[in-house]
């Protein structure tokens, strides 16, 4: 593994950000594992300043800082408990491994990897108690993989008088492209009830439930069309889950752009 070559003055400024040798060697060993080395990272630009990896847990980015290499997940840097600044790794390979080791932190019920590093997510504290509204009774005869077809789904939504409409072909194609870009398997959702799945995330509780088709919610806030504010209803469960994961990090003006967003009326 490449060693740091930092001047004494530089060391004074970044010493609290440096990952110690023990962790560097540990992450370097992770980087050499066959399944990790096989992961294909992409360059953000021709200069190659950033490399990125799209995953169901967010987008990892690794770039060179003046004190070393840093890693971010959906814009949030990996930091050390002793410093609010991004941690610096000895090499790009080690930074990638560090990001992958911590990639799943905050998702599901698994505890985060405890090594003094964590993602510095600057946003309101996520909710951990979500009441599922009873919009429609779920037909117990419908299996989770049941699909109506978009035309039939639209008809059922009109008959139900719901303020909702089915995901169109363009949205579905966008989500399928997102799922294909993931080189890692998605997290396992918890089945809370028939037709209702839940996933803890660093941004709150994602819920996918059957509302004639499937609706997606984050902390009780539904995914709606950006124009018209109708709930988006998916015919296929996997499309609904993919949409939830793609939009989970949305905050402020930073969001996944596909013509949908979390219902803003809850802010009023």
Image: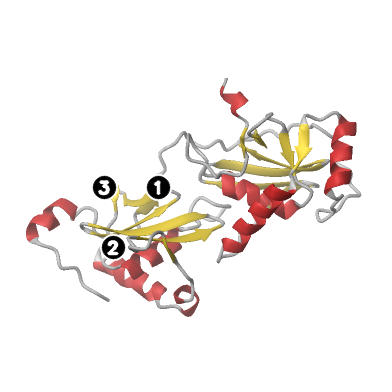
Q: What secondary structure is found at the residue carrying circle 3?
A: strand
Answer with mark 1 or mark 3, whichever residue precedes in sequence: 1
Q: What secondary structure is found at the residue carrying circle 1?
A: strand
Decide: few, some or many residues near mark 2? Use Cα within 10 Å; few <14, some 14-19, many ≥20. many
Q: Which mark is residue 1?
A: none
Instruction: Work out which residue is located at the far left of the displayed protein and give it.
Output: 8
In whole angstroms, how far apart are the C-alphas of marks 1 and 2?
A: 16 Å
Pair 3/2: label in front = 2
In whole angstroms, how far apart are the C-alphas of marks 3 and 2?
A: 14 Å
| Residue 240 in view here | no
Q: What secondary structure is found at the residue carrying circle 2?
A: loop
Instruction: Tell me the quarter of the image containing the N terminus.
Output: bottom left
Q: Mark 3 points at which residue?
A: 83
Decide: few, some or many residues near mark 1? Use Cα within 10 Å; few <14, some 14-19, many ≥20. some
Pair 1/3: label in front = 1
Answer with mark 1 or mark 2, whichever residue precedes in sequence: 1
Q: Name the residue under label 2.
A: 89
Residue 65 placement: quadrant: bottom left
Q: Position of residue 56 (x, y in %)?
A: 56, 56
Question: Is residue 27 toward the left or the right of residue 240 in the image?
Answer: left
The residue positioned 24% from the left and 74% from the top of the image is 2
Considering only vertical position in the picture, is 214 above or below 267? below
Question: Is residue 132 toward the left or the right of residue 226 in the image?
Answer: right
Instruction: Work out which residue is located at the far top of the displayed protein and give it.
Output: 268
Q: Position of residue 55 (x, y in %)?
A: 53, 59
Foreground pick, 45 / 27: 45
Q: State if disc 2 and disc 1 touch (CB < 8 Å).
A: no
In whole angstroms, how far apart are the C-alphas of marks 1 and 3?
A: 14 Å
The residue positioned 77% from the left and 33% from the top of the image is 164
Question: Is residue 48 toward the left or the right of residue 170 in the image?
Answer: left
Decide: few, some or many residues near mark 3? Use Cα within 10 Å; few <14, some 14-19, many ≥20. some
């Amino acid at each position: 593994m490449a060693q740091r070559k930092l001047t004494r003055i530089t060391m004074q400024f970044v010493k609290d950000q440096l990952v110690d040798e023990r962790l560097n060697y540990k992450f370097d060993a992770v980087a050499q594992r066959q399944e990790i080395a096989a992961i294909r990272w992409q360059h953000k630009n021709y200069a190659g300043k950033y490399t990125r990896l799209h995953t169901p847990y967010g987008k990892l980015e690794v770039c060179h800082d003046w004190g070393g290499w840093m890693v971010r997940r959906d814009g949030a840097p990996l930091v050390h408990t002793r410093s609010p600044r991004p941690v610096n790794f000895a090499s790009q390979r080690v930074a990638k491994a560090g990001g992958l080791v911590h990639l799943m932190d905050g998702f599901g019920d698994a505890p985060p990897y405890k090594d003094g590093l964590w993602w510095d997510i600057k946003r309101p504290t996520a909710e951990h108690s979500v009441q599922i509204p009873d919009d429609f009774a779920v037909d117990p005869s419908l299996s989770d993989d049941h699909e109506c077809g978009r035309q039939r789904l639209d008809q059922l939504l009109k008959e139900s008088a719901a303020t909702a409409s089915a995901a169109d072909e363009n949205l579905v194609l966008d989500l399928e492209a997102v799922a294909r870009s993931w080189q890692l398997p998605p997290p396992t959702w918890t089945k809370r009830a028939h037709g209702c799945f839940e996933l803890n995330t660093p941004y709150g509780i994602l819920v996918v439930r059957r509302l004639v088709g499937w609706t997606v919610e984050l902390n009780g806030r539904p995914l709606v069309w950006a124009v018209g504010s109708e709930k988006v209803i998916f015919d296929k469960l996997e499309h609904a889950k993919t949409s939830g994961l793609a939009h989970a990090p949305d905050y402020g003006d930073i969001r996944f752009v596909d013509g949908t967003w979390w219902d803003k009326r809850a802010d009023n």
